[in-house]
Every structure is written in structure tokens, then in C-alpha cells.
Image (cartoon, coloured by chain):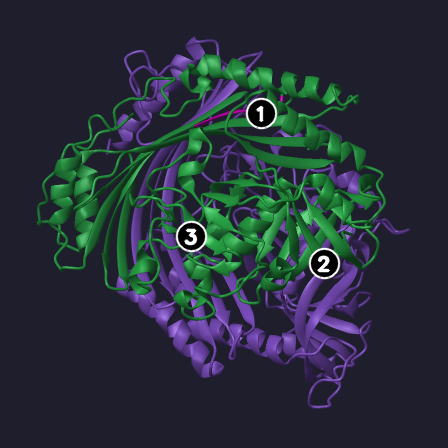
Chain colours: A purple, B green
Amino acid sequence: MPSSGEGDAAVAEVLRELVRRGLGEAEVLTKRGRSRRLTLELGSESSSFSQERAWAVRASSRRSSFFVAGAGELPVGEAGAPGAPGWTWPEATGRPFRLPEPEAVPPWTQPSDIEAPLIGESEGLRLLASLGDELAAELPGARLLLAALEDGSSEGELASSRGVRAAFRRRLATLRVEAAGPGHPGAGAALYLAAREAHRFHPKALARRLADRLSVAANGAPPGQLDAAGGSGAADPRGELLLAPPVALALLAGLLPLLVGPGAVARVSALRDRRGRIGSERLTIVDNGRLPGGALECPVDGEGMPCRETVLVEEGAFRQPLLAWWQVDGAAPGAASGCCRRASWRDLPAPGPTHLYLRPDPRLSVATLLADVARGHYLIDATGPARFDAAGERFELPVCGFAVEAGRATAPVAGAWLCGTASAFFKGIAAAARDLSFLPLDGMLGSPTLLVTGLELRPAS
Amino acid sequence: MPWSELDTAAVARTLAQIAELPDDLVDAYFEWREEVELPPEDEAPGLRIWREEGFAVRLMRGQRTWMASRDGIAERPFAEALRQVARALPPVGYPEPRVRAAPIPAGASGASDPAGAASIADLAHVLRDFPQAVARAVRAHHVGIPVRLTLRRHRRWLQVVGSRLVPEPQSESFYSCVLESQWGRHGALLPRLDAAAAEQIATAAVGLFRARNAAAVPPSFHGVAVLAPAAVAVLLHEAVAHALEADTLARGGRPEAAIGLALAAPCLDVLDDPAAAPPEVRRTSDDEGLPVSRRWLLRRGAVEEPLADTAWSRMSPALMPGAGRRGNRHLPPGPRSTHLELLPGGCAESDLLAQANGGLYLPAASRGGLDALSGELTLRFPHGRRIRRGALAEPVGACTLRGQVADLLARATAVGSERVAAGAGWCAKGGQKLPVWATAPALRLEAVTVEADA
């Protein structure tokens, strides 16, 4: 492994060489990462440890451009050429591009947990095994089909011929769980979560969530039908709906085209009411790449531009879409926010949310919202992907949960579709609770539990 | 081949040192891959190249597996990976056999792909020429429609070394193409960029265009559907291959319990035969270095030999390994299909249509999914045609075929007589993106339900 000084010299040499070849816009990314992956699957157990080291270069002249990426060291040959012997820079083709000018990055303190060691093999396997044990305790007969924990860290540097210099470190753990309920074939449920550290996954809480899902799926009746016990699964399908974060986020993920990129302005215009609002006063949507404690917290984006908090919708009023620096040209309102993500070293930076969330109300608990539901449903999870119409306005989302009367759950509901429009969803938000939760969807998307009216719960056809 | 400087015998001897118990299995997987992409003209940057090499070392003991992987191929990281897999302390020294990947000459290819012999610059020309060939093929359909194409050449070389087995190195070379138009999107894998490939992409583009104002499939359509070979390939991949992967079967119980089960109509004989795939992607061993076989998944509709890799064959000895595939060195192998074949029946396509009056003709599926627990299968079609009086009639819009796997496969009543290479695409099960190939004739399904998409 070369020292940082050697790495800097190699990067500088590559940039010089590219500029010498007439590629005035040149950028070099170097990245190193390591991760531990632990899996329990149907009686087998596996543990893997990987170390990755890679680089990516993109360069443009005034007329054409290229992108090259590779695993291993950034190789610098005698002529500054990368790659294996015989390798030369490819001929630039296609359209040219610009790189950003450097911008001052506001002070940022690196979170201490970024330095924490990766979870150990036995500790990680214990966490997964306890998840299975807790699930069996919560719902006898339920079993884990798959539990995969990945804990990784990475660091990298970015340098460009424009003078951008950025270094970043990241820490991310993900957990994928699939479980089956009692019986044969049992109902299924799955979770996919991300957090900065594996220790933040709590087996008991996760097992309870899975057990609720499995139990509702096994015993629930479609809305409008009596449940097996003769209770009322017949709460008003157009009544109040309490949407737990996974349900709200499944909708938000599908509605991102209304919030990201210059094209969002035209799409959002159809949602405006006479006062120019697109949502209720309870609707505030924010994106913040440097959200404290966020799984992807970082002071800069994938192009080295400073991340900052951007309010996209404020108390129902659309303020601006999420914009990268090159999308700010007056066509859409608002400022750039450092939102070009690189999914990996193999990917080009592309604008998108990092931590995009509906702002919670710290005064309201979920229990308070539930107590306020006179007749409606508490939807705890999405059981499949949402379907949107071609315009991205009307949606149907398969969900499960409970019928609610006078603030109490009266019957499990499954085989239900939450139907409505983007406009009805945004305008129907009557309250948001304080339980902001994030899920790894398109970036990290977050929402608290929402009390919503104006949507409809229909039985599956 | 990049493995001329890889001392496989020394690697095998070193691996043998960490196999402490009689049933321990140790292997090393070396890979070298390159992808070259030409995006649509209006996108920057232009030519995009990815080159990577690396390896993984694995130890299987009973039901446990340890794996260590690295980017780059060199002696010191290899010894470190061995130590990690053996869970040995750093002072334990393992030999450092010569493990280097030789440079690949710019155009070298292990496959019989003419473009494989080209340099990157020549390849760029080949990639640039293809959209023009597609445009010409589109015009031959008497329409002129703008399309955007993203083309990528994929090449991979791999060498597996076991402590007792060193199979022949393997290589693959193929192209992927993503077509975007204002009427929809179409993705395809192509063994080579020739006139037939251009015609295939053009046909897809024209199909999307002609279905732009198509009526929706009647609500709750229930009747006969004739699936063209490309659609059959996706059906087989989801309903037969995924359903008969050992890890999928294990979700419902013992995988070997499926053997002998009547899963489909007797007219369906389905095989997975990686050795019969197009020459550019043909394989003699799987990603675990085990010889591939002509594996009968379904013989006369009954399950004969589910797909298994080494790990699952150790857990269920009735299963034969040889179908282990991995997305890359950092991911573990899993049981997957490579090249599916549906054996032809005796029905000409005209006969399939003649007995499907009022039904639907579905030329290609854009997406498929199988719920491993419930057995529900979903196939999405971007467009189709009504069948009237034994001929293709008016187009219909996007629709979805849904049903239980066994129920759907039991509804197959006739298999076409003409097999074609069709339906190649990406499979993304478990986050491992793998190319899959198929050779299939058309197929008639009776009394199926097809829903119009929103």
C-alpha cells in the first residue's frame, strides 16, 4: 500500500498527463474499502471479509470525453498511462463535460464511530442468531430464512484539474432479513436496513417488527371484510390512515421525480392548489447530505461539492427541487446542494437524495396519533412495490396493518392496496409523529409515522 | 489468457495446507474482467471502460464457509487472504505462490468474437456503428423512430484452483444493449453485434412504437396466451430455473424432496446446459470449477435434477453440483442457471395461433419475478397482440401474467417446433447480477389470467 504522499503524487501525475493531452477537465477518484459479511441461511453459516481498492478517472477536452475505472492501485506508467502494460488512455469520444470549481466546505467534525472497528465474526453471527431466537419467541413457529449482515468502511480522495481536493470516509452497515411465518407455506416478510454501525441493529425490535408483519399476513383479512373472529375488519376504508414509516417511504420513493432535478418543477406544477401549495402545512421535505448521525453523513458529495441542508417543500409550499451544481441555470428555482452521489467507484456521479426526509413533529408520539383515529386503519408495512401510473401521479401500494376504531386496533388487515394520488397524499397529511426512521431506498429516505386522510384502502382484486 | 503467470500447482499446494479435515473444501477463484461502454451520443462522458482483477479464497467445513476476497492479484494479499480464511494468527506464514495476472492484450478474447480481436479504439468503432445498423433495420420496418442505445461489451476470464482440482480456465464475451425510446425501454444481451442483433433490437423498438396507442388488454382477461420464444425464456427462467434452485427449494423444506414432483405439463422438457450456450459464453465448468452438465430440470414436466452448487450438494447429497455461479469475487457462489433450453414440440407457430382464437400473443417479457415462499410468478409484458382467426391482430398495451408456478406450467398445452436463441437477459437474484441465456420455441398456455397494467 503506498503512503498517502505516494498516492497524491500518482494522482497529480495522472492529472498532469491528462491536461497535457488536451483533456482540460480531468478528475481522479481513489478509494479503499473493507467489509465483513456474515450470513445465516437455512442452516448454513458463512463469513467473508473483502478488501477493495479502486480508482476512477474521467476527463474531457472541449469536444469529447471518456471515463476509465479499475480495481487495484492507480497505476502510473512511465508516460503517466494507467493500467496494465500496453494500456493507454482511450480515445475521447462523445460529448464533453465540465467539472465543478472548488467551493469552500463548511467545518465538519468526523463522527467518532467512523473509526470504530468492523463487527467481529462471532459477535455478528451472535447478532443474527439472536434475531432468529427473538423471532421464534415473538411468534412461535416463525423462522429466519436468511439473515445477512454487512459491515463496511471506506475512504477515498478526489482531485480534479479545476483544483477540487476532497477526502472522505464512510461507514455503513446493512442488514437483510427474510423470514417465514408458521405453517406451510408460511407467510413471508423481509427487511432491508442500513445504519452507520452494525451495533445499531436491535434484534428484539426487529424480531417484533417481523413477527407483526408475519402475524398480520397470516391472520389479516382484506379491508371491508369481517375477520375470522367476527370482529370488524370493516373500518372505514376512506377514513383516517396512520402510515408507519415503511409505508410512507414506499410512497415517497415513488414520488421522488417530483422532488429531484429541474424536471420536477413542471411535474410539481400540476399538484399546486390555488394558494400554490402542493401539500398540507404538515408537509416539510428536506435533503441533507451531512445530516448528523445519518448513515451516509459526509461533508462533500461525489464530485467534492459541499453538502448542505436543502428545504425542498416547506409547510406545503414547494421551494425548489434537489439540484446539482450543473443543473442550476435559472430554469428551476433554488440553489445547488452537493447532491451528486457515486453509488460506487464504478459509477459516475449522478444527482439524487442522500438523506431525504419528511420533517417529524417532536411533540407528537405515534401513540398520540393512534389515539386520535376514530375509525380508520394503521398500516404498518408495505408488502410489495408500489405501482404508479405513467404520469407518476396515481399509485397503488400493497400494504398490511390493522383496522382501528376509537384509537384501538380491532382486526388485522392484509391483502389490501393503498390507493390514491400524489396530490391527495401530500395534501392529506394531517399530522406527523416524532419517530423519524430512514430506509435505504434511493439514498436514505426518511419519514415519521403520518396521519393521512384522502387516500383509500381497497381489497386486492 | 491472463493466467499464464499464475502458478496453479503452487496455489493448489498452498490451499491444501489449510484443508485440515477430510471433508474440508478449499478453493481460490481468480477473475479478470473488462467492460467497455458507449453511451448514447448525447451523454457524457463518452467511452467508458472498467477493468478489474481480483481473487477470493474459500474454505468450507461442514455447514460453515469462510471467504476472503481482494482487488488486485498479488502474492502478499493472497497469503493474507489465506490466513483470514484459515483464521490463523498473522505470524503463521503461508507460502506465497506466484499469483500474477498477465496483461491482456487489448483485443485478446477467449471467445470466437470477431470484435474481441479488436483494440479498444477498434471496438469503439464497432460500438459506434451498431446504432446505425439498428436505425437501418428500423427503417426496413417502414418506420422512422428516434432511439437511444447504450452498448456495452462484457469480457470475463476466470480461473478456479482447488486443492485437488484445477479445471480449465473459462472466458465469456458478450454485449448488452439498452434501448430507450419515448414509447418504452428494452434491454437485451447479445453474443455478438451482427445484423441479426441489429434486427432484434429494431424489432423491439418497432414493437414499442406500434403499441403506443394500443388498447389495454381487456379487464380480467382469461384465456389462451401464446408466448413467443423470448417470452418463454423469461417464463422458464422464473418458473423453472429459479423455482428449482436449491436455495429456493430449501425455503419450503428439503430441496431433494422436489425430485420427481410433477411441476409442469408433460409437454415441457427443460434443461440447463451451459456447454450449449452461444460460443461466446459457452462454459465447460461453473464458477466453482466443477464440470457443467446437460442438466434435466424437467423431464416430461417432472422435476429431475434441481440446480445446486457445492454448498447445497453437501447439505443435500441427492443434488449434483456444477451450477454454482457468482456475480464477482466479493460475492459467494449460489445455485443458478446459465443456459436454459426448452425442447421443441411438434407444433408450427401457425398451429399454435390457429388454436388460440381470441387469445393474446406476447412477444417478449420485460421483467419477471418469483415469490419463493408463495410460489407466485409475475411476468410483465410491454405489449402484445390479440389473436384473431389464427393470425396476429391489433396490438394491446402493457400487461402482466400472474399465477402460481405449478398452476401456470400445468397450463402449457403445446410447444412450438422451431427453437431460437432468445430471451437472454440479466438475472439479479440476491443482488448478484448475472447474464442468463436461453434457447426456446414458442409456447401456448391455456386458461391463464392476464391483467392490463395501470
Q: Amino acid at mark 3?
A: Leu
Q: Amino acid at mark 1?
A: Pro
Label 1 resides on the chain identified as B
Q: Amino acid at mark 2?
A: Val
Q: Could you tell me which secondary element the residue under label 1 belongs to?
A: loop
Where B159 falls versus A28 (above or below)? below
Q: Could you tell me which secondary element the residue under label 2 belongs to?
A: strand
Confirm whether residue A409 shows in the render. Answer: yes
- Judge whether residue B141 is colored magenta: no
Q: Estimate the spatial distance between the alpha carbons at disc 1 and disc 3, rounded to whole Å.
A: 31 Å
Q: Quadrant of residue A268?
A: top right
Find out whether the residues at labels 1 and 3 contact each other: C-beta distance under 8 Å: no
Does residue A50 appear left or right of residue A310 in this picture? left
Label 2 resides on the chain identified as B
Percent position (x, y) of residue A402? 68, 78
Task: Name the mark on residue A38.
Answer: none
Percent position (x, y) of residue B218? 84, 53
Task: Name the mark on residue B39.
Answer: 1
Label 3 resides on the chain identified as A
Q: Main secondary structure of the magenta part?
A: strand
Q: Residue at x 27, y 62 (%)?
A: B64
Q: Residue at x 54, y 68 (%)?
A: A189
Neighbor class of circle 2 (other Cα within 10 Å; few <14, some 14-19, many 20+) is some
Which numbered mark, 1 or 3, is in the foreground of this view?
1
Q: Quadrant of residue B366?
A: top right
* The furthest residue to the right: A274
Where B135 falls versus A368 (above or below)? above
Task: Name the mark on residue B448.
Answer: 2
Count the marks: 3
Boundaries of the magenta span: B35-40
Residue hosting label 3: A172
